[in-house]
């Protein structure tokens, strides 16, 4: 009976070690795939590789970084000037969606989340959507978790800068022209008093 219990413990330990080793190996492969995905192929192939890493692996840090790199790559291609209008719009939409994925699904990956907020804020600013940009900066500046990294101060400065930019410019009213002291006269309106000599 004791030998059976000992054998069971050995099997459990062996399975645990195998699971841990497989998980570590998978994680290592994921990081290798992430870095390798950006080194080979056309820009479109690199984006496809990054999307594959983001959807294939489970490690939150790895996946968040893969989506962030995917978003950055899509944004670069959208703004490269080498794409047609429909491609630009598609890539821009994909970049915005990927940044949102990082923010919504991986909130504990602070560096990736902060980078995503900054990129979305920059896009909003470039389109003069001041309130939307402020929301992204404020999300970093007001979250105490970001106080440990420099991004918090940078975001607070951006909020202050936006407050100054967004204030409407008020122009002084032009001074009213002074009214004429008396109405202008025309030749027809001049009345000549009758001559006093005519009465004599």
Image: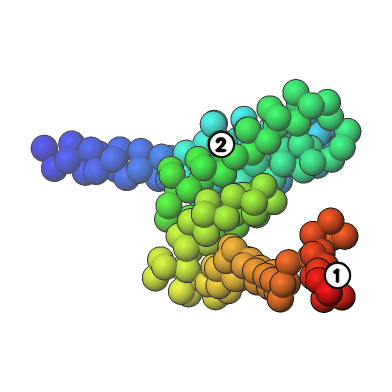
Secondary structure, mark 1, is: helix
* Residue 109 picture location, percent across and down: 48, 55
Viewed as shown, does residue 116 lie left or right of 148? right
Q: Position of residue 67 (x, y in %)?
A: 59, 41
Mark 2, residues whose alpha carbon is within 10 Å: few (<14), some, or many (≥20)?
some
In the rendered view of the protein, which quadrant contains the C terminus? bottom right
Q: CA distance from mark 2 to mark 1?
A: 100 Å
For the point 60% across and 40% down, which residue is it?
96
> Front-most of 137 and 94?
137
- Residue 61 drawn at (x, y percent): 51, 50
The residue depicted at 57 percent of the width and 44 percent of the height is 99
User: Residue at the top extreme?
Assistant: 86
Q: Nearer the viewer, mark 2 or mark 1?
A: 1
The residue drawn where x is 73% and y is 67% is 183
* Residue 38: mark: none
- Say which residue appears at 86% left-offset and 70% top-offset: 198
Q: From the image, tell me which residue sits under label 1.
A: 198
Question: Residue 2 lies in what quarter of the image?
Answer: top left
Can you identify the residue that label 2 sits on?
Answer: 97
Q: Is residue 124 visible?
A: yes
Q: Is residue 22 visible?
A: no
User: Where is residue 92 shown, x and y percent of the image?
Assistant: 68, 36
Tell me the crowding category of disc 1: few under 14, some 14 to 19, or many 20 or more residues within 10 angstroms, Cα based.
Answer: few
């Amino acid at each position: 009976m004791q030998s059976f219990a000992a054998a069971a413990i050995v099997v459990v330990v062996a399975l645990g070690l195998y699971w841990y080793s497989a998980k570590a190996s998978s994680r290592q492969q994921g990081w290798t795939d992430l870095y390798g995905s950006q080194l080979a192929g056309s820009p479109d192939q690199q984006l496809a590789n990054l999307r594959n890493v983001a959807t294939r692996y489970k490690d939150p840090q790895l996946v968040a970084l893969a989506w962030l790199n995917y978003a950055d790559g899509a944004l670069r291609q959208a703004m490269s000037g080498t794409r047609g209008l429909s491609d630009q719009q598609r890539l821009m939409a994909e970049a915005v969606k990927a940044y949102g994925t990082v923010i919504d699904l991986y909130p504990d990956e602070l560096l990736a989340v902060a980078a995503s907020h900054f990129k979305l804020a920059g896009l909003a600013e470039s389109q003069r959507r001041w309130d939307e940009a402020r929301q992204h900066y404020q999300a970093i500046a007001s979250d105490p978790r970001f106080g440990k990294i420099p991004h918090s101060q940078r975001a607070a400065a951006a909020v202050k800068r936006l407050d100054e930019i967004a204030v409407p410019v008020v122009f002084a009213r032009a001074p009213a022209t002074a009214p004429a002291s008396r109405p202008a006269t025309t030749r027809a309106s001049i009345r000549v008093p009758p001559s006093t000599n005519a009465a004599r």
